[in-house]
Amino acid sequence: MRRVLYKKGFTLLELIIVIAIMAVLATILIPTVTGYIEKANTATDIANLRSLNSVSQLYRFESNPIQEDLFTGLTTDSDRMNALITHNYLSEAVVPKQKNVYFTWKTDTQQWMMANSKVPSDLNGVTMGTGGHKGYIKGSYSGSTLDLVMPLTLNNVNITHVYQDVFNGKGLTSLYFDPACVITEIHARAFNNNNLTEVTIPNTVTKLDYAAFNNNPITKITIGPNVTFETNVFRNNNAFRDTYLAQGAGTYLFIGGSWVKQ
């Protein structure tokens, strides 16, 4: 009579040992694989950045007439990227593989660069408006962060207006707006009485209200086109407004008591 052999399954102890070995291997291999992926993403982004600058320079050489700023009249990176797509230099927008990184155009060097996205600050004490004021952030900032990174949204609503006095007298030492922000107006005294030394006004902003950045030791301002001003927006006078209206968008330095465009 033929003997029938039955294969034994794993015992509970053997299963525990196998699981333990797999866990140890995972702790070794996962960080290694993750590191390889991060390096690959970085290498891809660097290569894409080179290609982006190459096609942009080709676009410059084939433009007629050749402009001092390749993307004259375009104020956002998405608009600049779309211009390259429209003129068949790109098939689609180039997006970095790395997290918290974006491609941005530097008008001073006429090159695309990689920049790190910043972590938005918690807007303690600040509320989102409702009804006709949906998109307006209101209240009085009570957070401890003095290097403020303005978030794109509050309560899942896009921030479109910074209302009166929200950050007035809070001791802020720096202010950063994400390039993707959609803020259109900064209201009266919104950032009055702080310690800001420079500010980049988002390109989406079309109006700066009374004393919006007054009483700050600001010596550098970067600003886009078509912004209207109320009075005393900077340094308790209208000197910057008058210079801007005469010379337009760009970066300005406060030198020897006057605003000088770079």
Image (tube, rainbow, N blue to C red):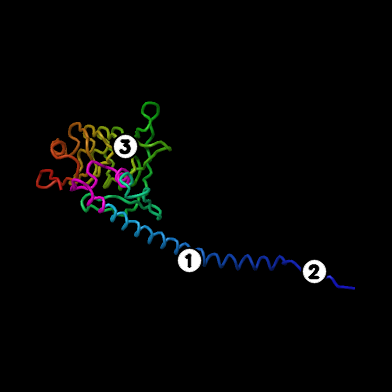
Residue nearest the viewer, comparing 121 with 115 = 115
Q: CA distance from mark 3 to mark 2?
A: 73 Å
Residue nearest the viewer, comparing 216 with 243 = 243
**5 to 120, vertically: above or below:** below
Magenta stretch: includes residue 186: no
Q: Residue furthest left?
A: 256
Determine the image quadrant of residue 170. top left
Please tell me whether mark 1 sits on a helix, a strand or a loop: helix
Determine whether, in the image, residue 39 is placed left or right of residue 245. Answer: right
Q: Amino acid at mark 1?
A: Thr
Rendered location of residue 28, percent (x, y): 52, 67
Q: Amino acid at mark 3?
A: Ile
Determine whether, in the image, residue 194 is placed left or right of residue 93. Answer: left
Residue at position x 11%, y 47% in the image: 255
Q: Are marks 3 and 2 in contact (CB under 8 Å)?
A: no
Mark 1, other Cα within 10 Å: few <14 / some 14–19 / many ≥20: few
Q: On the rendered image, what quadrant is the N terminus found in?
A: bottom right
Rendered location of residue 230, percent (x, y): 20, 31
